Each structure stands twice: as C-alpha cells, then as structure tokens.
Image: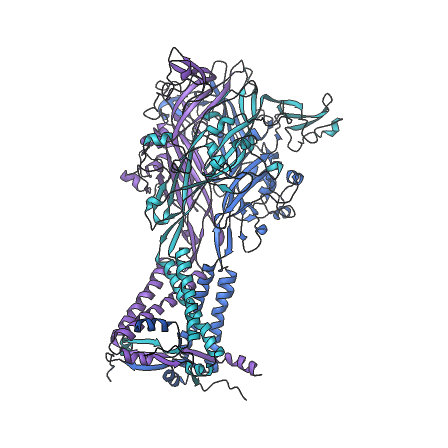
Chain colours: A cyan, B purple, C blue
C-alpha cells in the first residue's frame, strides 16, 4: 500500500530547483547580455532566418521538350549541305530524356562507301615512305580507318580500310555557322514536378491564360516569365559566356550573356536550370519555377571547346552497295536540370531547435557562475551562498 | 601541490542542484501533465512516429528497359503506312536513358524532296494575293519552309522552299489510333539501386523464381507484384487520367485509370514511379520496390495536349537525289522515376532527439514556477522557500 | 513606476541554482565517468567524426561524353556485317543523356521487306499441322509477326505478316564478339557539377595541364587519376564481375575486374560512378571527383543476362519498295551516375549538437542522484540535504 500511495503522491508533488538570487549590476548585465545573444541566435537566426521551424522535401521532376523552326542554307556557299533543315533534320536524335541537341554547324562528307583509300593528312602518323611505316591491323589515334599495311606512294600516306573518301581534316567548321538562323527556333519546355512528402504536384504551364497566349508568348524574364516557350537565342544570351556564372533573362538587354554566333560555330553545352523553391506555409499558388541558364563548355582547353559528334545517313544504290553521308554536327546541347526544395512547418525541427536553444541558455549560467565565483570581489560570499557542502563518509581528504 | 590535489579532488566530488520539493495537488498535477505531454511528444511522435532514431540516405538508381511486341496496320484504311510495325520501327529513338517512347498513332507524308511548293493552308499567314504578301527569307510561325517571295497564284498561298509536298495540316490524327494494338506490348524494366551510405544494393528482379516465371509473368499489383514485366495497357490504366493523381495497379479492375484508346490517339506522357522506401533495421529482404503510374500531359491547354514529334527516314533515288518519308509520330512517352530513402538506426539523430527532449522538459518547470510564484495563494511562502537572496555590493537599489 | 523599476532591475539580477556539493569518492567517480562518456560522444563522435559541425548540400551535375575509335570486322567469318565500324556506326543512338551505348556484337538480318513468310522455328507455338493451329490476327509470344491464319505446309510452321525473312532464332551471338576490338575505344567524359547552396562550381577536367596531355592521357587510377579519358577496356575491368561490388582502377592490374571479352559477347550494363565528396572548409582545389565502376546486369536469370536491342537501317529500291537491314545489337550500355555532397561549417548544426549535448549531460545528474538518494549508505543524509520540503495547503496527505 505504501508503494501505491507513493505512486499516487508522485502526481501531487512538484520539484523546483532552489535558486540563489544575486543582486549585482555587473553579473546581471553580463547574464542578460549572454542570454539575449543566445535567444537572438536561436529565434532570429536558427529558427527564422535558417527556417529551422520547417522540414523540407526535394523536388522530383519530369521534363519534355518540343522544338520548332525551319532554316534555309545558302547552297552556293555550301553545295554539299541540303538547303532546308527542319525539326526532323536538325534534332539528333529525335528525342532525349531531359536534353535536346540542335545542329548549328556542319561538315558534310557525302557518298562514303567502305573501301581502301589514303588516311587523312591531318592524322598524326599518316605520313609514310615505305609499307612498314603502316603496320596492318592497327589504327592511328583519332584515325578514320584500319591500316592495310600499305603505304600509298602517290600521296605518301598510309592506306586504310575505311568509309572512303575519309572526312577532310583540313576543313574547318564554316563561318558563319551554316544553321546560324537556328537562333530563332523556339523550344516549348513542359515540366511536371512533385514534392512527394507533401503530395504537392505542380507544373510550369501558367494557370488561367488563354490558348492564344500560350501559342504566341515568349519567355523574357519579365512580364512573360511564366511563359514556357523560349527562343534559342534568348536562352544562349541568358547564359554568361566564358565563365561558370549564370545570368537570368534580364541580362539579355544589357548584353552580358553569350552571343549566339559565338556558340553556333563550334557548338556548346547550355544548362537550362529550373528551380522550384517553395514555401508551402504560403499559398501553393506561389510555388512557381525560376529559370536560369549557364554555359558549361569551356574554352580553356582546345580539346574541350565546343560540342560536336558524328552521325550518318545510310543508303543503298541499285547494286545493293551501302553508302552514306557522314555528318560532323556542331551544335548546342541543351541539358535541363530541375532542382529545388519545398519547405513546410513541422513540429520536430521546430521543437528540436527550441529544445537545444533552451539547453544553450545554460551557457549563460556557466559563464556567469565563473564570474561570480572566481572574479568578483564578493566571490567568497557568493561561493558560500551557492554551495551547500556535504561531506560523505568516503570523501577524498585533501591533507594539509 | 594544491593544484594537483584540487585537480584530483575534482574526480571525487559531485554537484547536484538543491531542490525545493513542494507538496501541492494543483501544481503537482499541472507539472506531471505538462511533463507527460512533452515526453509523449518526444518519444511517441519525434522518435517513434517520425523515425527520429534513424538516419537516412537517398536512393541512386540505374534503369534499363526492353519493349517487345508487334502490330499490324490495316493498309486499306492507311495506305501510306507500312503494314507491320515491330520494335525497330515503333521505338524512336531505339534507346533513351530512363525513358522510352512507343508510337501509337501516325500521320505519314511520303516522298518529300527539297523543292518549292505552296505552304500548307492551315498555316496562319500562308494566304496571299500578291508577291509582297510573302516576304522572302522569312518563315511563318509553325510553317513548313522558308518563303521564296512569290505568291502562288493557283492556290493563293505563299511559295516556300521546303521538303515538298508539305505535311497536310488538315489531316487529323487517325481514329482509332493506327497502332492501337500497342496496348499489348510488354516492357521489361530492370532497376538497379544503391543506398551508398549503407552499402546496400538492390534490384527489382525477384529472387528465387524460375526462368519460366520470369519469361511469362505480368505485373498486376497483386500476387505478381514482384514481376518486372508490364503490359503497356496495364501501365496506362494504372495512371489516373485527367488529374495529377496516380493510382496503383489495383485500380485497373475498378476502371478508374486512363483508357489506352483515350491516350493512344493524341499521345501522352506517363510517369512510371518506382519507390524504394526501406527500413534497414529490418531484414534487407524487405527492401522492395513499389510501382505506381501517373499521367503527366494535361488537357487544359490545346497546345499541351498529347505528345508527338516528327522524324524522318531518308533515302536516295537512282539519281542520287535525297527524298524522305516524314512521320508525325503520336505516342506515349514513358518516363521512369526512381526515388526513395533507406532509414537505419543511428546514434546521432537518436541522442539529438533525446537531448532536446530533456531540454524541453524544462518548459514544465518554467510554467509551473510561474503558477507557484505568481498564481497560487501560498505564493509568498513558495517564493521565500525557492529563492535565497544575496545582495552584492553593486546591487541595483530600488529606492522607495 | 514600480513596473519600470522592476523591469530595469531585471537587468541587474542573476539567478543561479543552489548546489549541494557532495564529497564522495564513489559518486564522484561515477559522475565524472558518465560526464566523460557523454562529452566524448558529443565532441568526438557527433561533432567531429559525424561532422556534426557542418551542413551539407547535394551535387547537381551535367555530363557529356564523346567516344572515339574504329574497328574492322573479318568479313570472311561475317559476310553480312559491314567491314568497318566507326563512331557513326557503333554508337546507337548517336546521343543519350548521361549514358552511351557501344555495339560489341551483332546478328544481322539483311534485306528484309514486309511480306508473308513462315514464323521462326524457335518461336514457341510456331509449329502447326493445320490452319486452325494459327489463329489469324494474333502474334506469338516474342514472335516476329502477325499470324495470317495459314499453316505453311512445306515447313509446318505458321505463316506471318512480318519483315521477311525473319531473324533466325537459332543464330547465336558470335564468338568471339564481332566488335571485340571496341575494348580499345576511348571515351572522353566531361562532367560539370554545382553545389548550389555554396555557389561552388567544379568540373572534372584537370587544371593546369597542357593541351597535349589532355589529348593523349588515359585514366589509370594512379598518376593519371585526373585524366578524364578512359579506354572501354579499363572501365570494364575496373568493374567487379558477377556480383554487385565495384572496384576502383587499381584492380585492373590485379585482374579482379570483369574481362572485356566476357562482356562483349552478350553485352552488359556498366555504371560509371563519379563521386564528389567535398569538404568546403578546406581549399576548393581539393574538391575532386572519384571514379568507380560497377557491372549491373546479372547472370542469375537467363532473361536478364547481357544487354541487346534491335534497330534497323531502312532503304528503298528502284521501285520505291522499302526494305531494311535488321540489327540485333549486343553491346555495353554505359550509364554515368554522379553523386556526392559538399560539407561546410554552419552554426546551426554545430550549436544544435552543442545544445543537445549540454542537455544530455543532465543524464549524469539523473543517474548519480539515483545512486546518492537510493543506493549509498548515507542516503538519508543526502536526501535531507538535497530536498527542502515545503508543504502547500493543498498537499496530498499520505495517512498512516
């Protein structure tokens, strides 16, 4: 019965620490000042500025794109290049996930068929005088084919099995770029995102606009910043050239972005960033995307400048022999990166910050105790008032 | 020697706060109630419900897919469309990373070659009466080519350089969809994931099943929910149509998903979500994927409905002139999103929660002190017992 | 005025708990031991080892790749396969985002055109004796076409509409692999990353090297571990075969990686992992990538072994009839996964750990109080010294 009564009495008791209340201007001011700093840090910095009262979730995203536009090429200047390039021609491959590539410049080698011909003169090691300069079965670094073992005496270069005639290494990428007018192409970016922790789903299409607006609008960083249709030129000019920085749309006017013609010659890589930073304690209508652009290819190294790759169109002649047109396609690879966080009030981060803030307040007591017990003139008095000495039977005796 | 003895004596001393033990039913009950709430929050909510005792790691994933199936087209109805479509025909491009596209419907424009012809009648601005209605070198919005500067008098439309004849804008996507039977195609999804912090690697293939099962099983959200082979129809019907919601497999039977024929006409975008939420304090065998599906294209705006793109097959005739078949391919873009977290007990989050929980308990003391010192009848007595007044020599004097 | 004076006096007062200072060897040692463990855990484990003083940010990444190399095929052994394969031939599709595929082996079915022919003998269900064994309009599982409804009496197999002649199911993937020499191909991986929270941008290209070095270097996990150009063979041999483990470059020499020829026959999936774990409290120059490789396809199930897909090259003959070469391409799918975290000192995680560490120290007091008040011999004395009993007017009376 004693245990039950003791148990019940637990509910009707209250333990509170006995407090030594020291009236001292010096210590009081130090104490309040430290407490103020700690509380200011906890409330002002940790909870409010660093959003310590919110939990967060990372965005998950799906992006699809559609490019439109058509361009004509001057075939007097470029006789090997087809005069008209439309979407089915300049988007290679037709689809990529989170990216798209637009051809801006070309070197075309038509009517290649597999055979034997001399290696290109720009290939290091292609020069020869005798057959054993050209070991059969090997290929030269960045070469176009596999050596037959013969040295072609007419041109003093190694023979290779290859798609012949090989691409002419002396041909430079045309200036101005063949598909310079691709700057006017438009891309419609559709981005669906989700914050799964909060079951919030958003998309970048604006709400409450007409079909006509959506057909004809163009993103400009300003009044039309909800429009998801971009011209390639505006994207490129929005990306700071030559460094790693990025620039928002507003810098088009000020002209500090890349120039399209600078990029279209050798190609490049542009990152289109869509940032979704949403405070879900506010209306979800305020959860909107921010676009920015960044140029990623670098001109530091010759080998890493620009962007190009090779592909071919293959045909068969009347005899069934396969031949092809080889395209060295320079162009802009646009990669779309979607990132962001949703934040929302949650009890756990809030109370964790409150709890460790309350614990941090004990620092004020620790510091002020040191002042009171070791620094002030009346420290002996304070020490006597603060401590109640109890000597246990197994105390450690400091012998004098 | 004094310092050494003082230092050693530190180990043999113990400071504990002197406690005022108040026996009062009112305060006792309030105190225990607040303590109970705080402890209940810390243990029940922060630690157990919100898994505050666990640290987490995000999933990293690689996905590959393989589609199988073959479909036949009624060439009486669609004379321009090839009669048989197999994997090499309807998956365009042949590979994408984390995505695949299946053609479900087509508008085919065969035998286009580059030349001069009238712009399509549906293109806004194509109508003309005189040559200056058609400024040379420009192209109309969503036009098929570049204006020559002439107005074709026979049809009163601007002439364009283009792949001629241009695609007929009045042709609607066929109904029913040309490759409607693509609903029966199957996709084998292979997903390898890793939680690098815990060195846990998993994959979605089931363990301990026979080769025969894996060849012939089909995912159905129920008994076969470990089978990684899906029919396209079951994926589409598992995705809630018309809203952002998603629906698990079980809703196929109840028929609340999208209907395949509704999607195949204009195309669409379907997200296949693979969620890996694993509690690594349990057996790693319980770390299994959950599949769900979500339709992403929206019918709110005409411009954003469905999904299609254009690609071509290019050929050369006996004269070496290039011509092509242009395909406007409607279809379903399947995008695979893998997400998830692994959680495992870790000391730091656990003790952080315990620590700030202990600190939060001081709130009970703060509140009950207010009650005891300012509200209760016997507050003068309690105040006298709680505080030991010490007046320092630099006390602030409140003059009466 | 009283309130103002009381308010001002708040700043000149200091409350410190009255302490019972017990000199007892037993309790003193227990107390210091527990405090030492708690402080050791907080400082040594939570703050230093688990980097509790740092906040972190996840990496965001863009990757582009370029493969180079050329290989010759023995056409005596493989008459249907073109003799030379260069980049435009073996990278299918020409571009993928964060991935690339290299053909290593092939089964070629040339000159297919759409017509009627017998189904392949390896297709389950293709055998027949009478027409009704072959229900028209259906297709067999993994079949090549759609059944016409007739049984071909010459070969006793169902007739199908298909691209004819169908691929021969008895043909095995050639051994050795047709494009075995693809092991010598090189891939240049360009990786741009960003830690947006800290505005840190990095790339994997080394700084301060010459153009010549970058043209000719090869990654080897050792002296050249900053070189971003890899041979396919070194990547494959760096990936542990047959299990989920991965192995860094150093294991090439020791030969514990996959062998290229083991992978090239049936194809496979290799993950190239680029890890960026950066401590931004150190110089940002130390923020460098680590490469590792992992083989993902598994040989557990016949159906999941290797990696292959089918694509076609389409042509038209003089009559305008379309025909094609069907390629069953085995090869290695390289998927690039970039991951990592940047860590940097931040006040909030640091002070949160300090705060909850201070709160945890109260556990020492809780445990030692139990020892002092309930276990030691002199507990009655200690109890009397610790507690100041105050009986309120509403105390709960335990009647004797």
In terms of depth relative to the viewer, which is nearer, A255 or C237? A255
Residue B226 sits in which quadrant? top left
Q: Is residue A264 visible?
A: yes
* Position in image of residue A227 (x %, y %): 38, 35
Q: Residue at x 41, y 62 (%)?
A: A40
Q: Position of residue C79 (x, y in %)?
A: 58, 24
User: Quadrant of the image for the C terminus of chain B?
Assistant: bottom left
Q: Seen in the image, is B45 located left or right of residue B192?
A: left
A123 horizontally vs C43: left or right:
right
Q: Which residue does the image show at 44% across and 22% down from the upper left?
A: B139
At 32% from the left and 81% from the top, the residue drawn is B385
Nearest to the observer: residue B71 or residue B269: B269
- Residue B291 vs residue A109, the one in the foreground: A109
Q: Quadrant of the N terminus of chain B?
A: bottom right
- In percent of width and height, residue A133 lies at 74, 29
Total numbered circles:
0
């Amino acid at each position: 019965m004693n245990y039950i009564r003791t148990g019940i009495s637990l509910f009707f008791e209250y333990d509170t620490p006995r407090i030594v209340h020291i009236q001292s201007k010096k210590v009081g001011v130090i104490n309040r000042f430290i407490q103020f700093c700690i509380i200011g840090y906890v409330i002002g910095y940790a909870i409010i500025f660093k959003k310590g009262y919110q939990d967060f979730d990372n965005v998950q995203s799906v992006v699809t794109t559609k490019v439109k536009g058509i361009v004509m090429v001057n075939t007097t200047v470029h006789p090997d290049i087809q005069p008209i390039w439309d979407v089915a021609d300049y988007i290679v491959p037709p689809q990529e996930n989170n990216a798209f590539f637009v051809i801006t410049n070309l070197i075309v080698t038509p009517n290649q068929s597999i055979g034997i011909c001399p290696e290109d003169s720009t290939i290091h090691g292609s020069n020869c005088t005798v057959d054993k300069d050209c070991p059969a079965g090997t290929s030269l670094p960045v070469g176009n084919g596999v050596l037959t073992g013969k040295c072609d005496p007419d041109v003093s270069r190694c023979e290779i099995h290859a798609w012949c005639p090989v691409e002419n290494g002396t041909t430079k990428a045309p200036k101005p770029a063949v598909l310079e007018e691709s700057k006017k192409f438009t891309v419609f970016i559709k981005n669906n995102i989700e914050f799964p922790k909060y079951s919030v789903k958003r998309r970048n299409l604006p709400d409450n606009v007409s079909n006509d607006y959506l057909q004809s609008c163009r993103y400009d960083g300003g009044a039309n910043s909800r429009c998801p249709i971009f011209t390639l030129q505006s994207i490129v000019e929005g990306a700071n050239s030559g460094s790693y920085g990025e620039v928002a749309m507003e810098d088009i006017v000020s002209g500090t972005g890349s120039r399209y013609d600078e990029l279209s010659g050798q190609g490049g890589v542009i990152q289109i960033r869509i940032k979704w930073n949403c405070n879900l304690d506010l209306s979800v209508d305020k959860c909107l995307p921010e676009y920015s652009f960044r140029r990623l290819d670098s001109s530091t190294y010759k080998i890493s400048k620009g962007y190009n790759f090779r592909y071919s169109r293959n045909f068969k002649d009347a005899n069934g022999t396969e031949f092809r047109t080889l395209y060295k396609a320079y162009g802009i690879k646009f990669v779309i990166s979607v990132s962001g966080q949703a934040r929302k009030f949650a009890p756990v981060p809030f109370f964790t910050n409150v709890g460790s803030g309350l614990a941090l307040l004990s620092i004020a007591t620790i510091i002020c105790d040191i002042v009171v017990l070791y620094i002030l003139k009346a420290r002996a008095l304070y020490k006597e008032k603060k401590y109640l000495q109890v000597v246990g039977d197994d105390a450690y005796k400091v012998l004098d």
